[in-house]
Amino acid sequence: MAQAARVAWVLGSSRCALAEGLLTRPWQPLSAQSRASFTRAAAGSRGAAVRKGSPRLLGAAALALGGALGLYHTVRWHQRSQDLRAEHSAASQQLNDSSVIISALKTYLVSGQPLEEVITYYPPMKAMNDQGKEVTEFCNKYWLMLDEKEAQQMYGGKEARTEEMKWRQWADDWLVHLISPNVYRTPAEALASFDYIVRESKFGVVEATMAKYVGAAAMYLISKRLKSRHHLQDDVRVDLYEAANKWVTAVGKDRPFMGGQKPNLADLAVYGVLRVMEGLEAFDDLMRHSHIQPWYLRMERAIEEVPSIHCVPPSCKD
């Protein structure tokens, strides 16, 4: 099955079309005498006499042969260019889903397969969401395309791999939807959030004022809609604390990270979602009123200790 997972989806076959407009110049018909000479020459007649039409005959034959060869090579080139365009279209697939990008990059780093090939393992599919809108989903978005040996070296067992996928999806389907309702919970918090955004961005005075007050008002209203859409409690902080404690319980007391001694992709997914709240009131409340702070601090240290990568797989061994 691992070997079958590496088979790229065929995106479709392209038909080659003959190039039009070639050899459209009207050629003068050969005289009967010239056609007879050409027939005898083609048949290998040794006793053919040189007639006055021979130069014209030879020129026409050369042009016809050259035109035929030109047409043949043009069609071959056109067919090859069509194939190259199809290959380029498959290789240049756009990825705009963060989970897919992480899965593709991790597969690339572990296996050393060409990135263009890895991307084809995550084909986009159109679907309708609960609101009746068309959305793009990616197949296998939480799955790393590794063979059995690579998967065993990375995870050590199927349970660890399944656990990572489960909690990565949980971070996307639930945890991330708690951020906006908590960050923009009140008008004061919304203003504080946009004040932070403005200070960290390069806005002029007028643009900064507009962004702060108009943006804060808009996001405050949007957060209320998100609260209703995702059926959050009246105090959205409670949902945030419960989610954090649920994650800490899943990690457990016997390992520093869900990935064991080192963070895995689920650890990174949860950390990435929570980190966007740093510097805001919601983040401070989360650290004070849940059990997630020790794990979060361990993640910060682990990320700081990651060495810089100066090589490209498969030459990288570590």
Image (cartoon, rainbow, N blue to C red):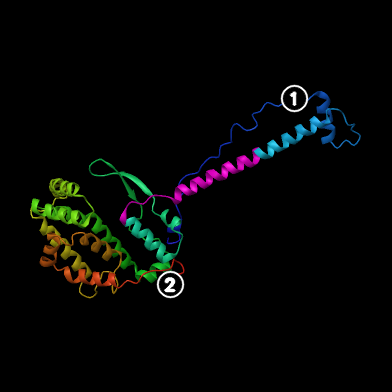
Q: Position of residue 285 (x, y in %)?
A: 11, 63
In this view, 124 is above or below 18: below
Q: Residues within 10 Å of mark 1 (few under 14, many from 20)?
A: few
Magenta range: 71-98
Q: Examine the residues drawn in magenta and state their main secondary structure.
A: helix
Count of residue discs? 2
Depth check: give the residue in front, 201 or 62: 201
Task: Find the residue positioned furthest to the front.
Answer: 205
Rendered residue at 17%/63% (across/down): 244
Q: Is residue 95 left or right of residue 26?
A: left
The C terminus lies in quadrant:
bottom left
In this view, 186 is above or below 148: above
Depth check: give the residue in front, 238 or 27: 27
In this view, 92 is above or below 248: above
Q: Position of residue 236 (x, y in %)?
A: 11, 55
- Mark 2 and mark 1: span between their CA atoms? 71 Å
Q: Determine which residue is flagged by label 2.
A: 317
Q: Determine which residue is flagged by label 1.
A: 29
Q: Position of residue 182 (x, y in %)?
A: 13, 55
Rendered residue at 46%/69% (across/down): 315
Rendered residue at 18%/72% (across/down): 294
Q: In the picture, residue 290 is in which quadrant?
A: bottom left
The local secondary structure at tag 2 comes to: loop
Task: Find the residue positioned furthest to the right.
Answer: 47
Q: Position of residue 63 (x, y in %)?
A: 72, 34
Q: Is residue 267 left or right of residue 237?
A: right
Q: Is residue 12 left or right of residue 54?
A: left
Look at label 1 and name its amino acid: Pro
Look at label 2 and name its amino acid: Lys
Q: Residues within 10 Å of mark 2 (few under 14, many from 20)?
A: few
Q: Is residue 218 left or right of residue 35?
A: left
